[in-house]
Structures are given as structure tokens and as C-alpha cells.
Image: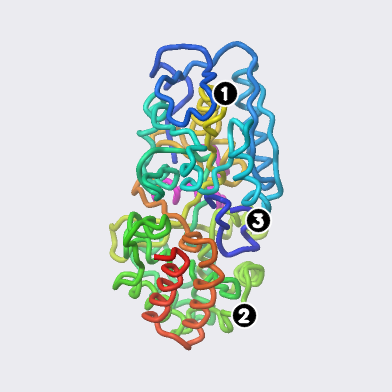
Amino acid sequence: MHNARRSPHPSRRTVLGVIGALSVAGVAACSAPGPASTSGAADSTPTAVSTSITTAPVTLKLYDGQGLKALDDALIAAFTKKHPNVTITPTYDPDNVTTQNQPRQLASATPPDLIRVISVTSGTKNNLLTNLDAYATAYGWDQIPASQLAQFRAKDGVAGSGSLFAKASGFTMTGLYYNKKLAQQVGMTTPPASVDELTTLMGKAKAAGLTGMVVANKEGGGVFPYQLLLNTAMGPDKVSQWVFNAQGATINNAESVAAATQVDSWNKAGLFPQAINALDANAADALFAANKGLFFPWGNWDAANLDKTMPGQVGFFPMPPATPGGKVAAMSDAATAFGIPSKSQNKDVAAAFLDFLSSDEARQIAVDNGFMPTGLASQPAPTIKPGSVLADVTKAFAAVSADNGQVPFVQNATAGISNQAWTPESQLMLAGKSTPEQFVANVQATYEDELKR
């Protein structure tokens, strides 16, 4: 989710959100040493893999979007310092053209060795991406929380399960920012443990002349609180299956209507800003920064900005479950999901770079660049300034990851559903011109129409 302050959701190109001890050295013992793979062209399912990196000079080509340059450059520098015989040559396209250029890069006779994977299913249709299952076994990636890898799996043309085809450099994370001073004013001493407690606090904020929750819906930001509720109401697996276009997946159900009804009731109770459909992301930022809103449903991409504009004044927590003690979940996409083209001649070395992404060093680099780290809960937590917003975001991500609660954004379910359904349908509901039942049914109808099924 790059430059996401200006957009209410990540574009499809980000697939656009972890904590532990999978070091490169620790897993290198998983298989016998051997030379770097020079497996032949279009070897899409290697079985004889090695976790040992050759000492001979090797050059890898990497392809990503310009928005990830700082993160990628830091990861490349750290990896090649560990392996000075390896050179990684990156190519960065403008973010808004990677969707068009990435498929051509992947299908090239001489593709990059590491490539941003925008659509796992597209990459697997013609065996253009390497099946990483053998590497996952060799390196022990199966120990990573399942929700961190689910969106990079595919089986029979559907993402979300099956074989692994990519691994993330880091993740985005969503939840609720809150104003600490205003929270104290309404008697909030700890983050709410349930949706009912959250609603009560929002009502107290309104009674004090404040905005309970800062939501901007000019660009579809009203879908944020809806999905934060949907993730636990419907469950991460079912929401993910819908985004991944699994056969029979639907959001036209009681759980989805309940989530929409909660958002609708918050709006009708005056807990959202007035003229919510005219408010954009920048105006929402300004409203929250002006100490006029208690909660702000948004993501990690705004943490550094809030630490600068409101130092020490902002906290963050995951959307609470319906009942205290329930599991938490959140929308969380990859910063970049890197895959290995099947025509790569350096698969073993490329896979070593993928493994490095969940090392302690790489996790720190991800956090330093504002993303959440991939890896295990048992790994040492990255160093973060105590009391910072980013520290709270990282803590929240650890909780969501421990509950296997990472969920892709519903706006990315099809190419056109964000503009064709989510934004206009949420605007109609929040304007009082449709019901939660109509909102859900109309989005599902557009989904089915786009999938032609």
C-alpha cells in the first residue's frame, strides 16, 4: 500500500500488512549443501533444491515498483553484505505501470530472478512462477503463521490455499488509531475489548462534542470500518476466500449484513463526521490531527506522519472482536510479494533471498521503512522507539498474526469492484439512500458479474 495516505485502500498491484526466529543461518542446515541452482528454463516445480549459496559470483535481477525502492535497496544491501559474491541488480518501474509491465517481465525469455507478484493465479496459469513448496520445506517456512502466506498460495486457479508461489518483504496493517488525550477525556484507560465497548466510547466522544470515529467516504473509506467488523464476524478464512474468488464465496449473508448494519447505525447515531461522503483522506487526516476525533480507522502507512504531527499523542489497536476474548483480525497485504520466475537460472540463490526476508535483520529493515515484519512470534521484536505509534502498530500486528487474522482487502477482489461497487454502494448506504441489505446484495451482484459466473 504505497502512498496510501492519498488512497483509502491498496491497489491490486500490492498483492497490496510476524514477529520471530527464522534466521538464514538457522535454516540453512535443513538440506545438504550444494551449488547454486542453474535449473533449466521453465522449471516451475523444482524438487532438488539447496539452501546453500555458492561462493562463485552470481547476479540476480530484481523487479519491483518505485514505491518500494527504499525498502528493497536496504534489503539488497544487507543480503549482499552477507553474501558478497552475490550481486542484485534492481529495476523499478513507476508504481502505476507495474500492473501492466509485470506480466511482460514474468513472461520474458530472460525474466528477473525475483519479481513482484501482483496476481498469483495469473502467474501460475502458464507455469510462469516457480512453485516454492520444496524451498518452504527446506527452509521451514511452514512455521510462519498461515495467514502470512495464504495470499501467496494457489490451487486450481484460485488463490488462498495450495502451493506457495511468493513470500513477502513486509506487510501493511490496519486497525484503529486513537487520540490519547481524548481517550482519557472519555474515560478510556485501555483499548476497548469488544465492539459494544467501542460503541460506548464513541457515544461519549459525541456527547463531548467530538467525532467518535473519523471516516472519510469520498474515495470509499467507509468500507474500512465495515471490513474491520466483517473480518471477525465472517471469519478471516471466509473473507479471504471471497477476495480470492473461491467458487461459491459470498458476502451476501447474515454476518456481512450485521457488519454493514453496525456501520450504518454508527453513522445514523452521528458518530461519524458530517458530510462523510464529501470527506477525503487528507481531510480525515486533518480532522484527526486537529484533536477533533477519538478514533481513526486506517493503517500503518500513516504512523510515521502521526508520530511527527502528533508526537506521543496517538495510539493504535486492532478492531476489537464482537465479544471480549475473541480473536482479532485485520486487513494486511504484502509490501511486495516476491516470487521466482520459472525461467530463472538462479533459483537457489533467489530462494535464499526470500528466506532472508524473514530474518531478524530483514525484519528490522521492514519496520524501519514503516512496514510490519514477516516471520515468527518467537523472533526478537524489531527495535522501535518506545511510545511511538509504530510501536503500537507492530504490537497490534503481532496479535493479529498470532490469531492467523491477516485478511486481504475486499476492494481487491476484482479489478473493478472498488470503483464499481464498494465506493458508490457505501456512499448510498451512508447517505441513507439504501439499506445494509441492499449494500451487501449489490456488491455481491457486481462481484458475480465481474467474475462472469
Q: Earlier in the sequence, mark 1 or mark 3?
A: 3
Q: Height in image: 257 above or below 144?
A: below
Majority SS type along the magenta span: helix
- Residue 163 is situated, as x and y percent measured from the top left of the image, at 38, 38
Q: Residues within 10 Å of mark 1 (few under 14, many from 20)?
A: many
Q: Earlier in the sequence, mark 3 or mark 2?
A: 3
Judged left or right of residue 216, residue 33 is: left
Instruction: Tell me, yes or no, if residue 146 can be seen here.
Output: yes
Q: Quadrant of residue 376?
A: top left
Give the residues drawn in magenta, as a range: 382-400
Q: Which residue is mark 3?
A: 3
- The amino acid type found where label 1 is placed reads Gln
Q: Are marks 2 and 1 in contact (CB under 8 Å)?
A: no
Give me the residue at 46% from left, 44% from top: 125
- Alpha carbon distance from label 3 to label 2: 21 Å
Q: Are marks 3 and 2 in contact (CB under 8 Å)?
A: no
- The amino acid type found where label 3 is placed reads Asn
Q: Height in image: 258 above or below 367?
A: below
Select label 2 or label 1 by which is in front. 1
- Alpha carbon distance from label 2 to label 1: 52 Å
Q: Is residue 420 magenta?
A: no
Closer-to-camera residue (165/295)? 165
Q: Which residue is mark 1?
A: 345
Give me the residue at 47% from left, 25% from top: 23
